[in-house]
Amino acid sequence: MPELNEHVLEEAGDRGRTLLVSDLIGLVELYEQSDRPGADPERVVTYAEALAEEGARIDAGSVPSAIEERLTDATSWVGDDVLYTVGDGRVSTFPQRWHEQLEGENDIRGYLKVILDDVGESEEAFDEGGAGTGVPRSLLFGVTAALGELNPTEAKAQIQALRDEGVLTEDADQHPNARVAFAGQQR
């Protein structure tokens, strides 16, 4: 098995008590780029064991059951408190549909279109973000970094440029996790 990624260990360790199994899976997805979607649950357990050895408050033995409790076979978004099966026994914080349609995407508009087409009424689809419709910035940045080729800095720059062009809008209330939508779709 390959060496553990220091970025995963460092960020997971920094979260301390607030580290959730979905957070750990998200970090593995982000930093261990693979030719297959998601993360191998056994690899996630290996990270949990390493974190526990370093003194983190994590029960590595409970990770498999924590994954199993949150796992869904849904191929579309059903919420951010679940984990999605994405084939080959792998799990993800994002649904299979997003993996299939967004792999390698480098245009923020492609992400918005796929996500908004998938969730339908986005006002109720996400537990985070400001009021109104659209995709919360933090979720959008997570998807672009894990599934595509845009880091958060590049995604922010594209959003700003497309806002300036009138293509995208964000929450008017300046929420720190504002929702991003196509102009004319946000309420």
Image (cartoon, rainbow, N blue to C red):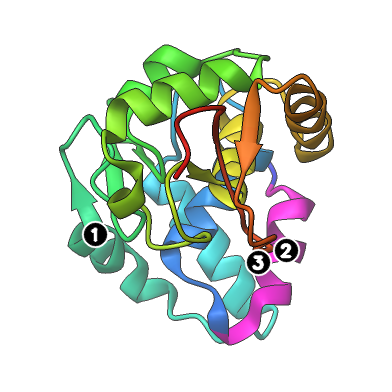
How much space separates mark 1 and mark 3, taking CA atoms?
A: 19 Å
Residue 146 drawn above or below residue 167: below
Residue 1 drawn above or below residue 118: below
Q: Say what amino acid the circle numbered 1 marks.
A: Arg
Check disc 2 and report its element: helix, strand or loop: helix
Q: How many marks?
A: 3
Where, by quadrant of the figure, is residue 85 drawn? Answer: top left
Where does label 1 land, which residue? Answer: 70
Where does label 2 land, which residue? Answer: 11
Q: Residue 159, which numbered label?
A: none
Write the start and end of the magenta stretch as one range. 4-17
As rendered, which of 119 and 80 lies closer to the eye?
A: 119
Name the quadrant of the C terminus.
Answer: top left
Check disc 3 and report its element: helix, strand or loop: helix
Residue at 52 percent of width and 15 percent of height: 103
Is residue 16 shown in magenta? yes
Q: Are marks 3 and 2 in contact (CB under 8 Å)?
A: yes
Q: Position of residue 107 (x, y in %)?
A: 66, 15
Could you tell me if residue 111 is visible in this image? yes
Q: Say what amino acid the circle numbered 3 marks.
A: Ala
Name the quadrant of the N terminus.
Answer: top right
As rendered, which of 39 and 150 lies closer to the eye?
A: 150
Residue at 27 percent of width and 40 percent of height: 121
How much space separates mark 3 and mark 2, taking CA atoms?
A: 4 Å
Residue at 77 percent of width and 64 percent of height: 10
Where does label 3 land, which residue? Answer: 12
